[in-house]
Image (cartoon, grey):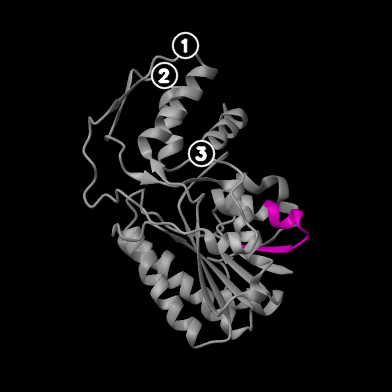
């Protein structure tokens, strides 16, 4: 099968690229000419690259006859990017990609979404609006659209988000880490399990409707405090000289913080998928591989 993958230079995308190649698929990568490809240097010779800032998306589909698009590229807005860039990356680029997929008779389009779409910062607002477009276009075309709604993804090689920051603070042996009370629930899922979720859905596309959504998590949300305490416990077991103190409740929750999440992984399980790691074994694997 020939797959077009966006976001292959990122955390999730690089893991997907390696896995898909191992499964014998042909992988075409859309990236920017200035993208850092360090995460996929070891497999670069096996990938077909197109620099999206140097060519038209239509040319990729004309030349490659794509069977499936897996779209993971996104702009989180964490580096003070202008809101127009967030919209252009998360909405406009997604729709251009889907438009080409429809016009060139691609079978399936995977979109990567977030479960936390009620917290309307600019990132999640853009993701929510994209999904509204995708639902509309799925009903008006032949292509199958799969929306993968990810919970709190983490794992080896990640360098953004809360968990890498927490570990960096412990690694620096800072005197204290100021945190909220940590009562907000999150479903922490290891990247290997997320990749397997994509693979399970990919292998069962023929069973799906034109529009399908999957929640991607372990199905067992826990308070953030529990996760942080387990990271701290395992890290200090590995490095007993660490003296960092966790100060829960010293900073306020962000405005409109989501305290509880509703996640339903039963549709994924019906296809044969199950999470291999719980949050504790995932932390153990992460510390073994990176620290």
Q: Is residue 283 visible?
A: yes
Tag 3's secondary structure?
helix
**Magenta stretch bounds:** 18-30
- Work out how far the residue at label 2 is from the one at label 3, CA to CA, in angstroms: 23 Å
Q: Which residue is mark 2?
A: 173
Q: Earlier in the sequence, mark 3 or mark 1?
A: 1
* Tag 3–tag 1 contact (CB < 8 Å): no
**Split into 4 quadrants, where in the image is the N terminus?**
bottom right
Q: Earlier in the sequence, mark 1 or mark 2?
A: 2
* Tag 1–tag 2 contact (CB < 8 Å): yes
Percent x, y of residue 180: 27, 35
Q: Which residue is mark 1?
A: 241
How packed mark 3 is, by other alpha carbons closer than 10 Å (few <14, some 14-19, many 20 or more), is: many
40 horizontally vs 79: left or right: right
Vertical order, 116 against 111 (above or below): above
Q: Is residue 37 visible?
A: no
258 horizontally vs 168: left or right: left
Name of the residue lying farthest toward the right: 24
- Work out how far the residue at label 1 is from the one at label 2, CA to CA, in angstroms: 9 Å
Vertical order, 117 against 152 (above or below): below
Percent x, y of residue 100: 56, 79
In reply to whether residue 251 is colored magenta, the answer given is no
> Residue at (32%, 43%) from the top-left corner?
184
Q: Which circle marks residue 279 in the picture?
A: 3
Image quadrant assignment for residue 20: bottom right
Percent x, y of residue 255: 21, 49
Tag 1's secondary structure?
loop
> Residue at (53%, 87%) from the top-left corner?
141
Percent x, y of residue 236: 48, 18
How packed mark 1 is, by other alpha carbons closer than 10 Å (few <14, some 14-19, many 20 or more), is: few
């Amino acid at each position: 099968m020939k797959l077009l993958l966006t976001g292959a230079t990122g955390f999730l995308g690089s893991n997907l690229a390696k896995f898909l190649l191992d499964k014998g698929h042909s992988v075409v990568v859309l990236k920017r000419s200035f993208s850092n490809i360090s995460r996929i240097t070891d497999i670069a010779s096996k990938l077909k690259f197109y620099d999206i800032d140097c060519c038209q998306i239509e040319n990729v589909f004309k030349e490659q006859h794509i069977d499936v698009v897996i779209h993971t590229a996104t702009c989180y807005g964490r580096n003070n990017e202008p809101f127009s860039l967030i919209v252009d990356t998360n909405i406009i680029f997604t729709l251009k990609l889907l438009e080409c997929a429809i016009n060139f008779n691609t079978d399936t389009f995977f979109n990567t979404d977030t479960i936390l779409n009620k917290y309307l910062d600019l990132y999640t607002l853009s993701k929510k609006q994209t999904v509204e477009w995708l639902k509309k276009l799925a009903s008006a075309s032949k292509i199958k659209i799969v929306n993968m709604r990810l919970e709190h993804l983490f794992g080896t090689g990640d360098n953004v988000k809360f968990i890498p920051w927490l570990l960096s603070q412990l690694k620096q042996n800072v005197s204290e880490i100021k945190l909220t009370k940590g009562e907000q629930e999150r479903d922490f899922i290891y990247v290997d399990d997320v990749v397997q979720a994509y693979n399970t859905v990919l292998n069962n596309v023929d069973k799906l409707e034109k529009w399908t959504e999957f929640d991607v998590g372990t199905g067992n949300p826990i308070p953030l405090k529990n996760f942080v305490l387990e990271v701290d416990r395992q890290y200090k077991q590995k490095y007993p000289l660490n003296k960092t103190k966790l100060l829960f409740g010293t900073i306020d929750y962000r405005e409109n913080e989501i305290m509880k999440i509703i996640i339903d992984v039963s549709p994924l399980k019906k296809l044969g998928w199950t999470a291999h790691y719980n949050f504790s074994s995932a932390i153990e694997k992460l510390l073994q591989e990176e620290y």
